[in-house]
Image: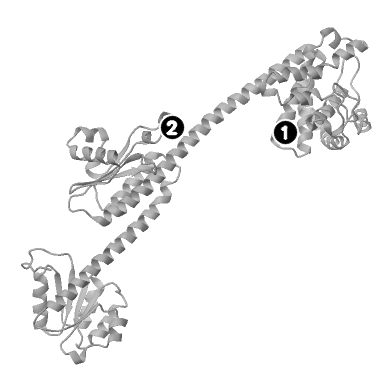
Amino acid sequence: MRKNKTGEKKNGYTLMILDDDQNILDALRANFRSMGYEVETQSNPLRALEQLKIRHYDILLLDFIMSPICGDEVVARLREFDRKIFVIMLTGHKELAPPLNTIRELDIQGYCEKSDRYDQLELLVESCVKSIQHMNTIYRYKEGLSQILSSIPPMHKMLPIEEIAQGILEELAELSGCKDVFVWIKPDNVLTDIELLDLPENIFQGKGCYDKDFEEIAKEKYEGDIAAIYESIDRGQIIADDRRLMIPLSDRKEVVLGILGISKPGEKDPTLMELLSVYAEQVSAALHNNLLRLLINANNKCLSEANTKIQNSYMQTVEALRLLVDAKDLYTRGHSDRVSRYCVELAKELGRNQEFINQVRVAGLLHDIGKIGVSDAILCKPDKLTEEEYASIKKHPGVGEEILSCMTMFDNLGAIVCAHHERYDGAGYPKGLKGKDIPEEARILCIADAFDAMMSDRHYRKRLPFEDCIRQLKEGRGTQFDGELVEEFLKVLERYDAISEELQWTYV
């Protein structure tokens, strides 16, 4: 390390020199000050320890033999509160040198005999300086990484991008130690449908000299910054000179999402650049994930709205078809609503899932859709039907299946509607299905339809008493109805009064 004139240039390192010989103190102070060190001296070990407690020093040079305590005792006490300071032990007598074990145990970095020449001591001090530089780099990198790690979780929260950008800006200023910093994010580089997310094309936030709109910066005297920004984007690389540092925010596909910018005069700082490079990678990943989540949420919202519209359209169609059936047969008006409700209650009693419940609900509403193909004269005939007329009536389940199969939204209901007059013993119509060959939804619908028919006034008969309906359901177990389902439906009918009260509107 070249010597310079006293006070000409400081190298940034501080020395404490402790020796009870004032001549040695003066000589060493003059020598190391000429090399650019900031030097303080002390002749009393106890006062030196007090001074070492209240101020940081990089290196301590001290004599071994002193009074009232020797150098090894000074270092032993020093290590109780400072493990980082580098220590070089001096002695005027080789035979009085401290033992090697003492040097190791006290973590003394160097040992040197006093001499009129300071070459060996200077080399030891310079070696300590290099070690300090390496340790400072390690400490700084470690602290920087710890700071980066602590800043990552908030960036992954579902916050507005502008709020995330503000957090990034504050972290960038703290990490770099600079007051003139900015964050520039371009969501449109990743997402083509930013209008869907209601995001601006540019999100720019700055501090210090960059605390203004990006348009203002582009118009004012920031030509060098603007050129560096676009060069960093085009090349996807860090751009650094003695005035500024531009770090691109690139994802794994090398798409540049934006720029982190710092106005930092002076020489390049490799450690800072490494830290900022790591930070930029984490910021890029967090921003990219946030933007994709925003897009997914927006798409999900659109899909949800579209699904709601489809569902509304579906139910409107169901309602229109139901009203069509009710308009066809005045005496069955409200019948489909009640059958649908009984189907739902039985499906719930059976513990079926929501999809199944929805299916029997709609099947109940549309089970008699095929009656629109039956003559009004037959449907409204007050007398007993002829065999030919009854045969016409028996066609309505199949007609209903044909009608529903023409509409994609109802094609899964056709087989259910077609089978709602099948009997468990196989004596039903139109296909004579038997037992479990009949879809469960249709077996449920059969019970609900029969029960409401018995409980309703028709033009050819009056409604039956509730007890008679229960009796007929029980008598029909295993013949007309699935016996297991009847048992479950009887549990539903234990709540009949409450259900009937809720269905009063269907009798109007």
In front: 163, or 2? 2
- Residue at 18% of width from left, 40% of height from top? 224
The percent coordinates of residue 237 (x first, y second) are 28, 45
Query: How crowded is the residue under tag 2: few (<14 C-alpha within 10 Å), some, or many (20+)?
Result: some
Quarter holding the C terminus is: top right
Tell me the amino acid under the disc marked 2: Leu
Asked if residue 424 is positioned above or below residue 75 in the image, the reply reads above
Residue projecting furthest to the left = 5
Q: How is the image coloured?
A: one colour
- Residue at 81% of width from left, 19% of height from top? 397
Asked if residue 89 is positioned above or below residue 200 in the image, the reply reads below
Quarter holding the N terminus is: bottom left
Tell me the amino acid under the disc marked 1: Phe
Residue projecting furthest to the bottom = 95
Asked if residue 372 is positioned above or below residue 341 in the image, the reply reads above
Res 504 seen here: no
The residue at which mark 2 appears reads as: 197
Asked if residue 12 lies left or right of residue 74, the reply is: left
Res 234 seen here: yes
Quarter of the image where one finds residue 146: bottom left
In front: 131, or 149? 131
- Residue at 84% of width from left, 29% of height from top? 447
The percent coordinates of residue 240 (x first, y second) are 22, 47
The Cα–Cα distance between marks 1 and 2, rounded to whole angstroms, is 36 Å
Asked if residue 76 lies left or right of residue 462, the reply is: left
Residue 484 — which label?
Answer: none
For marks 1 and 2, the one nearer the N-term is: 2
The residue at which mark 1 appears reads as: 356
